[in-house]
Image (cartoon, grey):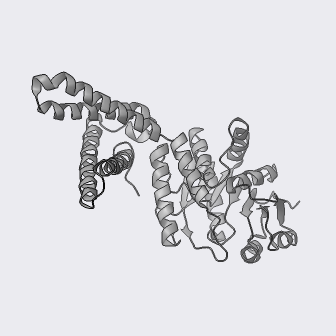
Amino acid sequence: MADTRKDGVAIIMPVINERKNLQGLLPLLAEFNVFVVDDGSNDGTQEFCESLSHVHLIERGRKMGLVSAILEGFRHVPENCEYSIVLDSDFSHDPKYIPELHNYAIKNDADLVIGSRYAPGGKNGDEPLRRFISVSGNIAFRSAFSSRVKDATSGFRVYSKRAMAFLLASQSAEPVSPSYAGQIDVLRRLESAKMKVAEYPITFYRRKNGRSNLRNSDIMGFLSLLIRKGNLISYVMVGLSGILVNELILSLLFGVMGYPAELFSIEVSVVSNFILNDRLTFGKRDSIVSEVFFSRLARYNFYSLGGIGINAIVFYLLVALNVDIFISNFVGIVFAFLFTYISSTFFVWGEKIA
């Protein structure tokens, strides 16, 4: 095995049928130990990798998932490597950033540095549909996990030796999601363990050759992880408790106050939802500590009223299109919920969407 003591860094690339891209990329990485994790290529990828002395081929025979391949790469990294850099093999991740990302990790003593399309100075040059998926996925991640990371789905990453050891050890307790969802699963775990995460701006390019391996099942796995591990369920439960509070207050005060009791009960339920979300759903956010309670409450009221308005607009638009009123109302509630959830998580308990 080639000596890695010079740099203390290894390159890991998960691949399936990427010979055309690897023929141009691997010669550019001759100064590194490169670990190519191949999941059953049949286009000559394996033979080409074996012809290069700085490339270490790890054959797995079948597709087992993107993050599963990355973790397999970690297992083969030599003990004297302080950092591993993971990048795609299709030139969407420009290798010119490797020294910059590596140096940034050392300078900031970071356990994970993400090559970020959405950090200040970063750019996303992908096709429109994939840009939409990427932006939507990152907004969903930041909402669900109370994270400030702007590009949680980027696969261009630097991992410290400590982070690699932690992720491999955590596999025994709860396996990391093996495919696309694993990118956010890994980030979630490192942030929960209080490891230092940083972002470095990059320009992301469209792949040069071949097709993307992103499938519908990967997106569904991503959404499943958000729901199972994120704060969405907590937010829904708090919302349901608000309905009960609303009904209780209304039943107690309607005989005394009449119709104004409806407005009062709505406001009490909004305040109840806010307090519970403030303490339970989003209480881990560092950014809320210095915020004035009543300032955040006022903003939450504003977005709650906005949700009511959206519910009404969607309802009347669908009814005008001859959609059943109950279906129209349900769709309106869903849109109102998403608006209130996303806007509140960023503008009440977080930071503005970048």
- Please indicate, yes or no, whether residue 123 appears anywhere in the rendered image: no
In the visual, does 243 lie left or right of 194?
left
- Please indicate, yes or no, whether residue 294 appears anywhere in the rendered image: yes
> What residue do we see at 22% from left, 35% from top?
266
In the visual, does 7 lie left or right of 138?
right
Q: Where is residue 67 in the image (x, y as percent from the top left)?
A: 68, 53
Quarter assignment of residue 191: top right
Quarter assignment of residue 210: bottom right
Residue 62 against residue 333 in the figure, above or below: below
Q: Position of residue 121 (x, y in %)?
A: 48, 66
> What residue do we see at 70% from left, 55% from top?
65
Q: Position of residue 346 (x, y in %)?
A: 38, 48
Q: Position of residue 63 (x, y in %)?
A: 74, 59
**Badge count:** 0
Quarter assignment of residue 323: bottom left
> What residue do we see at 72% from left, 52% from top?
68
> What residue do we see at 83% from left, 67% from top?
54
Quadrant containing the C terminus is: bottom left
The foreground one among 79 and 165 is 165
Quadrant containing the N terminus is: bottom right
The foreground one among 261 and 154 is 261
